[in-house]
Amino acid sequence: MKKSGNVLELKMKRKEVKSSFPKSYSELEKSNFDLTIKTLLSALRLKDDYTWGHSLRVAFFCVAVGKEMNLSSEELFELELSALFHDIGKIGVPDSVLLKPSRLTEEEFQEMKLHPSKSAALLEEIPNFQKISMGAKHHHERFDGRGYPSGLKGEDIPLFARIILIADTFDAMTSTRPYRKGLAYEVAFEELIEFSGSQFDPKLVKHFISAIKKEEIKNSSTFTLNLVQGEFEKEAA
């Protein structure tokens, strides 16, 4: 993954930070918030470089969709955070499961399925991360109610979680791994459409495809984020 400067150095935009913090928060509390984000990202990268890169790409996709939906700057800020840390619970997944190159056994799959709840358990302990933790906890819920960990259905699933699920699945489909080649964007779009209404929120799928097609027009191989300094490759390395 291409990097410019210290990729873990935060460049928090002050107007966005102020919109998400109570006015009573001190500069010290805001500084601690910045340090928390940097520490979590560092821990995730130390655990698994692929999951770290995947999380950055998912955040990029989510913000693009959020802009397509005309979300507020505060909502975009929270959505980016939720997407960045949707897989932070994988820190608690054994390497033998997380890094296994072949198909997981049923027991291993059940272990992997715990990561959204682990993400939420970690995030909800951080001040102002309660909403963000719900996006992480429920990003494997399905629109038809057959997902996990809570079996939520339709719009009972938090908005951020519904967006993250689409971005998460899209990145998984389009990323090339040592054991398989990633799908072309158009093929992945067709997969999202096919499972709209069952796995995915159909309205959000339309927003997602529209947003990513606009990004394609830019013909850029890299992207940037608001909360992490650096320039990152769109293709998984």
Image (cartoon, rainbow, N blue to C red):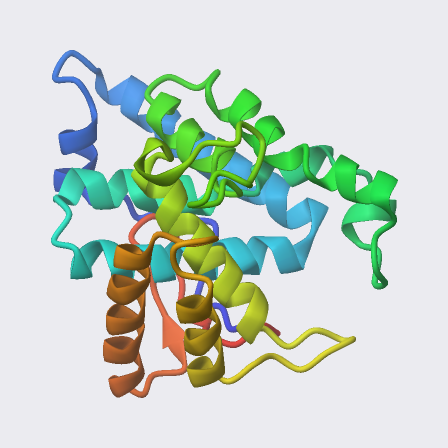
Residue 175, position as x, y percentages in the image: 58, 73
Indicate the quadrant containing the N terminus: top left, top right, bottom left or bottom right.
Answer: bottom right
Residue 121, position as x, y percentages in the image: 56, 21
Indicate the quadrant containing the C terminus: top left, top right, bottom left or bottom right.
Answer: bottom right
Q: Indicate whether 223 appears above or below 100.
A: below
Q: Indicate whether 216 appears above or below 103.
A: below
Q: How many marks?
A: 0
Residue 94, position as x, y percentages in the image: 82, 39
Q: Residue at x 53, y 35 (%)?
A: 39
Work out whether residue 7 can be spotted.
Answer: no
Residue 81, position as x, y percentages in the image: 37, 41
Left or right: residue 123 versus residue 21 is right
Q: Quadrant of residue 118?
A: top right
Left or right: residue 45 versus residue 217 is right
Q: Residue at x 77, y 48 (%)?
A: 98
Work out whether residue 202 can be spotted.
Answer: yes
Q: Residue at x 28, y 25 (%)?
A: 30
Q: Residue at x 44, y 67 (%)?
A: 192
Seen from the viewer's position, the closer of residues 86 and 224 is 86
Q: Indicate whether 126 appears above or below 132.
A: above
